[in-house]
Amino acid sequence: MSIYEVNKITNSLYSIKEDITDNKFPILIYLIIGTKKAALIDTGLGTGNLKKIIESITKLPIVVLHSHGHIDHVGADTLFTKIYLNSKDYNLIDNSHEFKVATEQRMNFIESNLKDKLNVYEDIKANIVKFAEVNYKDIADGDIIDLGEIQLEAISTPGHTLGSISYVNKKDHIAFTGDGIADIHWFNKSESMCVEGFLNTLNHFEDKTKGVKSIYAAHLPEAFNLDLVYDLQTAAKEIINGSKDKIENADYQFLLYGDLYAHRHGATTIYYDKENIYYKEKFCRNYCEVLN
């Protein structure tokens, strides 16, 4: 039994959907195939043998390019040997206590979504990728990964995590953002960025992706374009300029944020608290990376 669903987008691009939530919280992994090697954007939750799935598509050497270090993106890492992750996210994996909590969260998430599908749950439990030490290679803004006729440029997009990285394929006008740029974002004391810093991230991403037509995120089933980035930029500016927003419950799937201010513009939503708006705030000075 395979939990993975493969979709061929172009001859050089595949999506692999790992979903146990009936499309409520799908995890999208992307495979980009060059002439010399192939790149995998994240490895998902690790519910099965992802490497076997990839090898059924291509026999080229595989390099894993991480968007960030959260558990639903690094779950199958131990199946691969050459893996890149921005060093600012090493702590998400190297901190043994936090990583243990995250691995427990992984099983709780799987169990809660498959309580009515016990045969699927037992199959995943038996085949889930076990965690072990991984030697990550650092990747940073401006780095180029040459796959042969396709080059991927790393773009620093901090906000979801300090080490969030997006990747752009300028040849085919495509970008991959993981959770770094999507339709919903949260900024509170549990997160690593403030709204003002995130606006700088968005501006940096826009500058690096001129001409990009399709953007693929990790939990959105369909690609979007730069219009969503413009919506996020406008929403961030409105918050910075003092928008009057109502407090809402900001929980989303297994992400428990509690009550935060909610600001919407176009297709986007930004949840925030008052202490995570401006870079001048103490919290943001300590933890926020701002791109100039």
Image (cartoon, helix red, strand yellow):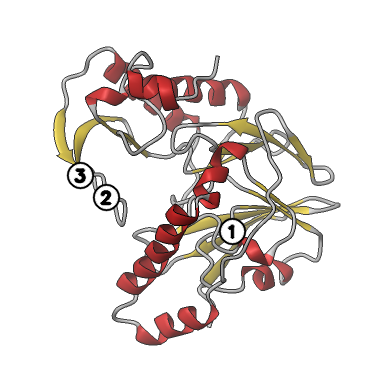
Mark 2 surroundings within 10 Å by alpha-carbon count, few (fewer than 14), some (14 through 19), many (20 or more): few
> Of label 1 and label 2, which has the lower sequence position?
1
Residue 68 visible in the displayed image: no
Q: Which residue is drawn at 31% across and 21% down?
A: 277
- In whole angstroms, how far apart are the C-alphas of marks 1 and 3? 29 Å
Report the mark closest to the observer, 1 or 2.
2
Provide the secondary structure element on which disc 2 rests. Answer: loop
Along the horizontal axis of the image, is 108 left or right of 36?
A: left
Q: How many marks?
A: 3
Three-letter amino acid code at the position of disc 3? Gly
Residue 54 percent location from the top left of the image? 69, 66
Label number found at residue 258: 3
Report the mark closest to the observer, 1 or 3.
3
Provide the secondary structure element on which disc 3 rests. Answer: loop
- In whole angstroms, how far apart are the C-alphas of marks 2 and 3? 6 Å
Q: Is residue 168 above or below residue 278?
A: below
Q: Which residue is drawn at 31% across and 25% down?
A: 276
Give the residue pinned by disc 1: 43
Three-letter amino acid code at the position of disc 1? Thr
Give the residue pinned by disc 2: 256
Residue 126 percent location from the top left of the image? 51, 83
Residue 74 percent location from the top left of the image? 56, 56
Along the horizontal axis of the image, is 137 left or right of 26?
A: right
Label number found at residue 255: none
> Of label 1 and label 3, which has the lower sequence position?
1
Mark 3 surroundings within 10 Å by alpha-carbon count, few (fewer than 14), some (14 through 19), many (20 or more): few
Residue 230 percent location from the top left of the image? 43, 24
Q: Is residue 286 above or below residue 172?
A: above
Provide the secondary structure element on which disc 1 rests. Answer: loop
Dots 2 and 3: beta carbons under 8 Å? yes
Relative depth, front residue between 225 and 187: 187
Three-letter amino acid code at the position of disc 2? Leu
